[in-house]
Amino acid sequence: MPSATSPSGRDRALEHLRALLTNPEVEGGFINEQDVADVVGVSRTPVREALLILASEGLVDLEPRRGARVAALTPRETAELMETRALFERFAVQRALSQGVSPHDALAEIMRRQEAVTEGLERLTFEQARTCIELDRQFHQTLVDAAGNSFLSRSYAAMRERQVRVGIAALSIGPSRWDAVTHEHGAIVDALRAGDQAAAEKAIDDHLSITLRTILTGS
């Protein structure tokens, strides 16, 4: 019998679906409730409950008699996502440095883990790309967490599925993009290590704008 601390069927279905939604290839497609129920080991009711939560977040569209369609990120929404991330991250830098706190050591450690994943590889499998982008998400979440504002951190974390999906889409354009991401992250870390707020904000803006341009232009 499940313990009181075991995740509910809805929560397990939600966790599975959130992971599924990070894949750019599912955009525009329908989610098969029974397939999800079979994989998670629950009935279809918890799956429907999880889909209602995702619909409230704008991640799926519930269509009568057709089911849940994975909402695609339009170019405008992608641009707005990057703009929102930049606002969060620049504020986090301002707040952290004003308090004499810098996450540069933690960020450098995440970068080392990123490099370990791709060392010696010329091409990335989808799972390797997902791992890289999850580490990328952790890099940026750690940056935001340095502000010491729990509401800010939770709000930023709520963009996870879109952030990972966009990152994988950018990385799939070519392996050279990952080398560029590493360089761009390094510029953020160097600026934070130096306590240079203006340089850190510029490095963040440059990184996110280059990622956006890569996605929108495919190069």
Image (cartoon, grey):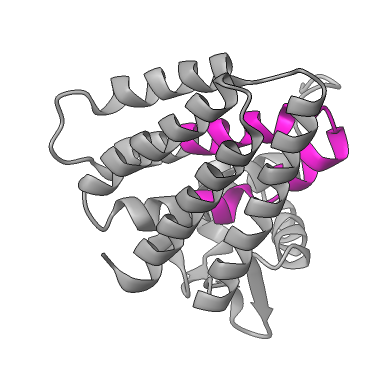
Q: Nearer the viewer, residue 173 or 210?
A: 210
Q: Nearer the viewer, residue 55 or 178?
A: 178
Left or right of 173: which side holds 188? right
Q: Which residues are magenta?
A: 135-164
Left or right of 3: which side holds 58? left
Where does residue 190 sit, x and y in percent of width and height?
48, 25
Q: Is residue 42 visible?
A: no
Number of callouts in the render? 0
Secondary structure mostly taken by the magenta-highlighted segment of the chain? helix
Residue drawn at (58%, 37%) of the image: 200
Where does residue 129 sit, x and y in percent of width and height?
33, 41
Against 191, residue 58 (above or below) is below
Residue drawn at (59%, 82%) of the image: 66
Left or right of 33: which side holds 182? left
Q: Quadrant of residue 25?
A: bottom left
Q: Nearer the viewer, residue 198 or 74?
A: 198
Against 169, residue 115 (above or below) is above
Where does residue 211 sit, x and y in percent of width and height?
42, 56
- Taking the magenta stretch, the answer to whether it contains residue 23 is no
Where does residue 145 sit, x and y in percent of width and height?
73, 30
Q: Nearer the viewer, residue 104 or 153?
A: 104
Q: Quadrant of residue 47?
A: bottom right
Residue drawn at (37%, 26%) of the image: 114
Q: Quadrant of the N terminus?
A: top right
Against 59, residue 178 (above or below) is above
- Residue lying farthest to the bottom in this orientation: 64
Q: Quadrant of the C terminus?
A: bottom left
Left or right of 33: which side holds 29? left
